[in-house]
């Protein structure tokens, strides 16, 4: 059985993430969505909320589970613990490549862990969690960019 990890902060999850993770589930027997607790900035949503939103979003897809990526844990160690042979990352465009290449190369040097890059769908290439939060905080409508469970919680959070 081939398992892969899709890691991220997912603060919050948006449709660019969802599309890449759903495609990863077509390539691997099992996909583990690893929700990172370790963020440099204070997150808008707690780790528990981010996990719940991901669980609600992916509940209709087979082979996807959601787990916390606790602070102080290397992604390579997490992958070993859950038995994953690869990390799957989405690329919005060439701007993502330098940073993602550094992480992929570091992970391969650390433990032989491979990274599979999937080109993000052009419909979502403008999406980032930061932009979704900013537009929402200024009163913009972000419903078409995020899963329903995220939209519900954003409304509760931001009024
Ligand atoms: N379209 C397609 N894919 C997208 C889009 C989009 N519009 N937006 C984001 N993505 C993909 C990217 O591949 C991104 O990496 C992933 O979704 C997650 O996005 P974010 O923004 O939620 O996640 P980040 O960048 O905050 O996550 C960083 C990690 C948690 C992956 C990273 O810090 C990490 O691996 N941490 C573990 C500790 C560790 O091992 N550190 C050393 C790494 S070498």
Image (cartoon, rainbow, N blue to C red):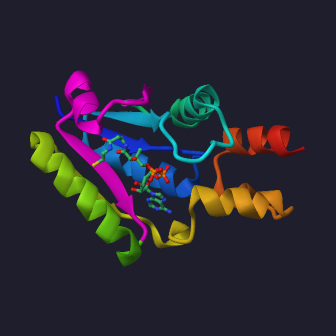
Considering depth in this image, is 120 or 138 the residue closer to the camera?
138
The quadrant in which the N terminus is found is: top left
Compared to residue 134, the image places residue 14 above or below, namely above
The quadrant in which the C terminus is found is: top right
Snapshot quadrant of residue 112? top left
For the point 59% across and 34% down, the residue is: 50
Considering depth in this image, is 94 or 58 the residue closer to the camera?
94
Residue 19 spot, x, y in % from top left = 47, 54
The answer to whether 141 appears left or right of 145 in the picture is right
Residue 114 spot, x, y in % from top left = 16, 48
Residue 33 spot, x, y in % from top left = 41, 36
Q: Is residue 9 magenta?
A: no
The answer to whether 113 appears left or right of 78 in the picture is left
Residue 27 seen in render: no
For the point 41% across and 47% down, the residue is: 21
Residue 72 spot, x, y in % from top left = 37, 30
The answer to whether 90 appears left or right of 110 in the picture is right
What residue span does the magenta drawing correspond to? 64-92
For the point 57% across and 37% down, the residue is: 57
Compared to residue 48, the image places residue 141 above or below, namely below
Residue at the farthest top position: 81
Residue 49 seen in render: yes
What number of labels is visible?
Answer: 0
Snapshot quadrant of residue 56? top right
Residue at the farthest right position: 159
Considering depth in this image, is 139 or 32 the residue closer to the camera?
139
Residue at the farthest bottom position: 94
């Amino acid at each position: 059985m081939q398992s892969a990890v899709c890691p991220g902060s997912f603060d919050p999850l948006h449709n660019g993430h969802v599309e890449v993770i759903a495609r990863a589930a077509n390539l691997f027997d099992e996909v583990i969505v690893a929700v990172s607790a370790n963020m440099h900035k204070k997150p808008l949503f707690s780790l528990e909320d981010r996990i719940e939103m991901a669980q609600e979003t992916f509940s209709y897809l087979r082979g996807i589970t959601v787990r916390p990526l606790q602070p102080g844990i290397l992604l390579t160690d997490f992958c070993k613990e859950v038995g994953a042979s690869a990390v799957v990352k989405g690329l919005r465009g060439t701007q993502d490549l330098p940073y993602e290449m550094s992480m992929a190369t570091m992970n391969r040097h650390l433990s032989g862990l491979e990274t599979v890059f999937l080109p993000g769908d052009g419909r979502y290439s403008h999406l980032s969690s930061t932009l979704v939060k900013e537009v929402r905080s200024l009163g913009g409508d972000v419903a078409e960019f995020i899963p329903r469970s995220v939209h519900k919680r954003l409304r509760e959070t931001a009024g």
